Amino acid sequence: MPDSVRQRIITAVLARFAAITTANGFQTDIGENVTEWNLIPIQERLLSGVDVSDPKDTAEPAVSNSGEDHELTLKATHHWKSGDATPENLRKATADIFRAIGLDRYWHENTTISAGPIATKSGSALARNGTVADVDQMDLSQGGKIVGAAQVTFRIRYRTETLNPYVLK
């Protein structure tokens, strides 16, 4: 059976964030360490990077009575270790995440990122109404250790068949 639409979106997000490197025209290399639902406390992580989680997905009947409209909430927490944990790097990484999201706000399944950064889109568009993003918090210390971290929350809207999370509508 194919992956659910939600899983396909998460796969696209992880791939997009992995492209956040200076070689691709971004300001940071946080894409070199992308994790999903990392449960290790930030101050204990060995590498700088970005962690993605999808804590909430709400669904309601589509206005047209044709399927279900979903709003998937995702959190991208990027973190820096010791000497790299500066407000400037937090802002750069936050900007890189916003830029990565903005390259293809409809989350086509086979989007590739190249230097520029430039997005080459192909495959099905997984999202319907683009993406909304905001920064929840920035912090330079956790547990008495110098660790820079910031969290970007964004929402992706998509539609599936009613009670069938595997079929994009």
Image (tube, helix red, strand yellow):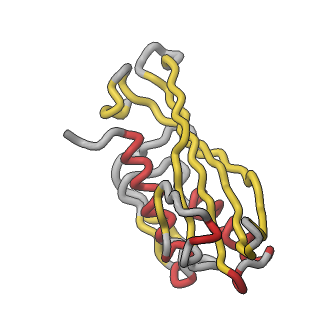
Q: Quadrant of the N terminus?
A: top left
**Which percent across, then down, holds residue 127?**
48, 41
Residue 105 or 155: which is nearer the viewer?
155
In the picture shown, does residue 157 fall above or below 135?
above
Q: Quadrant of the C terminus?
A: top left
**Which percent across, then down, holds residue 16?**
48, 63
In the picture shown, does residue 124 fall above or below 166?
below
Furthest-top residue in this view: 65
Residue 123 visible in rendering: yes
Q: Residue at horizontal 74%, vertical 54%?
A: 135
In the picture shown, does residue 129 fall above or below 120?
above
In which quadrant of the rendered view does residue 76 lie?
bottom right
- Residue 79 falls left or right of residue 145: left
Q: Residue at horizontal 55%, vertical 51%?
A: 105
Q: Residue at horizontal 49%, vertical 76%?
A: 32
**Which percent across, then down, holds residue 29?**
57, 79
